Amino acid sequence: MGAGKREASVRTQRRPEEDKARLLAMRAATLGLQEDNRRLRQEVERHRRAEELARRQAQMLIESVELLAADPGIDRFLGHVLKVTVEQIDGVGGTLWFPDPDNASVRLHLEYLDSRIIPAHESHHPAVLRPLPIGGRGISTFPTMHAETYVMREAVAGMPEVNRAYINSLGVRVLLTVPMVLGSETVGWICVRSRSGDPRAVEETIPLAEALAGQATLAVHMARLGEQARQAAILQERNRIARDIHDTLAQGFTGVVVNLEAANRALRKDRADSALDHIDLARSLAQSCLEEARVSVRSLRPDALRRPDLAVALQTQVKRLEASGAKAALHITGERLSLPADVEAELVRITQECITNVLKHAAAGDVSVVLDYGAEAVSLIVTDDGGGFDTGQLHDGFGLLGMRERAARIGASVHVDSRAGQGTTVATRLPIAGSVRA
C-alpha cells in the first residue's frame, strides 16, 4: 500500500474521535451555558422578589402611616398590622402577643380570625387562661430574636397540646412566629397561621413578615414614648400646682396669722381700732387666698387681661408685707420691658415666696424689693435685714426649691446670699434677648 493511501486511512480513523471530542466539548459548553442561564434566571427572580418585597413594604408603610394619622389609637394600628401581615403572606389568621414581665410569660393581646380583629377578652384561645412561657423552640413557640416556624401536624415542643388542638381546629398546618425586636428587647410577637403544607413556603415569607412586625414594634415604641411624655406632663403640672398652692396659700395664710397675732396684741393693750385694722387685713388676705386656691384647683392661670402688670403685682406684695408691721419698699429702675405673661407670673411667685420666708423666719424690720430692667437682664432682688441663715447648711426646703424651679422654667437663675444675723438677699436674674420695650 502506498504512503498516500496509508495517511488517508489514518485520517479516516481519527475523524470519528475528533468529532466525538468536539461533540463532548459542545455538550460541556451547552451545559455551562444552561447553568449560567439558570443562575441568571435565579438572580433575576431574586431581584424581582426583592423589588416586590420592597414595593409591598413601602405600600404597607404608607397605609400604616395614613392609618396612624387618621386614628392614633394604638390597638387599631396593631390590629391593622396583624391583619395585613396575615393577608400578605397568605395566612388564614393570626395573633399578637405581649410579654408579661410580672409572670415571665406572654399574654394574648389581639387575635385575627374570620376576617375580624378580636381582643383577648373575646378570644377562645386557651392561652387567654393559661399564660405561655418565653424562649423559642424547645421551650415555647415565642422566640426572642429570630422568626421560627412550627408544623402543627405533630406535637410541638413547648406548645401545650390544648393550644395545638385549638389551632388545628382552624385548619392550620404551619405556624410562623415573628418576634418584635427593639434593640436587644423583645417587645411582642406576631403569629401567623398558614394552611400551606410546605414549611419552606412559609419560611420564604419571613422577610416580609419581619418588615411588617417592625412597623408594629415602632408603634409600640412610640406609644411608650407618648405614655412617658404624658406621665412627665402630669408630674410637671402637679408640681406647678403644688408650687402655686405653696407660694400663694402659704404666703397668704402667713399674713393672716401675723395680722391675727397683731390684733391679739392690740386687744390686750385695749387698742381696738388697731385690732380691727389687723382683722380687716387678715380677712382681705384670706379672701385673696381663697381666690388663688380656686385658680390652682382649676389648674388655670388667671386671665392675663385681668391680671395687673408686674409692677402693680409686686406693689401688692409689698403692701401685704407692710401690713405685717415691717418697713417695705418697691424700687423699679431701668427702661421697662414687655415680658411674657408667664414670665411675669413666675417673678411674682418668686417674690411671694421671698416675702413668705421673711414673715415666717426672718423677723425683718426693713425689706427692699428692686425690679431692675437692665440692658442684658431683668433682675428681681429682695433684701431683708432679718436674722439670715448659714447658706453652707442644707436649707433647700420646698420654698427655695420652688423658687429655683420657677426660675428654671423661664430661663432665669436664683442666687441666695445670707449670713446668720446679717440678713438675706435673693437675686433672680433673667437674661433678655430681643425683648420688646414698652
Image (spheres, rainbow, N blue to C red):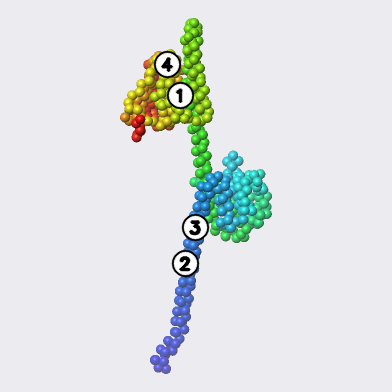
What is the three-letter code of the residue carrying label 1? Gly
- Real-space Cα separation, disc 3 to disc 2, in angstroms: 22 Å
Q: Mark 1 vs mark 2: which is more N-terminal?
A: 2
What's the CA distance linking mark 1 and mark 2?
77 Å
Residue 90 visible within the image: yes
Q: Which residue of the protein is positioned furthest toward the bottom in this rendering?
A: 1
Looking at the image, residue 160 sits to the left or right of residue 85; the answer is: right
Task: Say which element carries label 4.
Answer: helix
User: In whole angstroms, how far apart are the C-alphas of marks 3 and 4?
Assistant: 76 Å
Q: Residue furthest left?
A: 375
Which of the two discs, 1 and 4, labels the residue nearer the N terminus? 4
* Residue position for label 4: 322
Numbered label attached to residue 40: 2
Residue for badge 3: 55
Three-letter amino acid code at disc 4?
A: Glu
- Work out whether residue 16 or residue 280 is closer to the camera in this orientation and state it: 280
Residue count near mark 2 (Cα–Cα under 10 Å), binned few <14, some 14–19, many ≥20 = few
Location of residue 249 with respect to 62 vertically, above or below: above
Q: Which mark is residue 33?
A: none
Label 1 sits on residue: 399
Q: Which secondary structure, mark 3?
A: helix
Q: Earlier in the sequence, mark 3 or mark 1?
A: 3
Q: CA distance from mark 3 to mark 1?
A: 60 Å
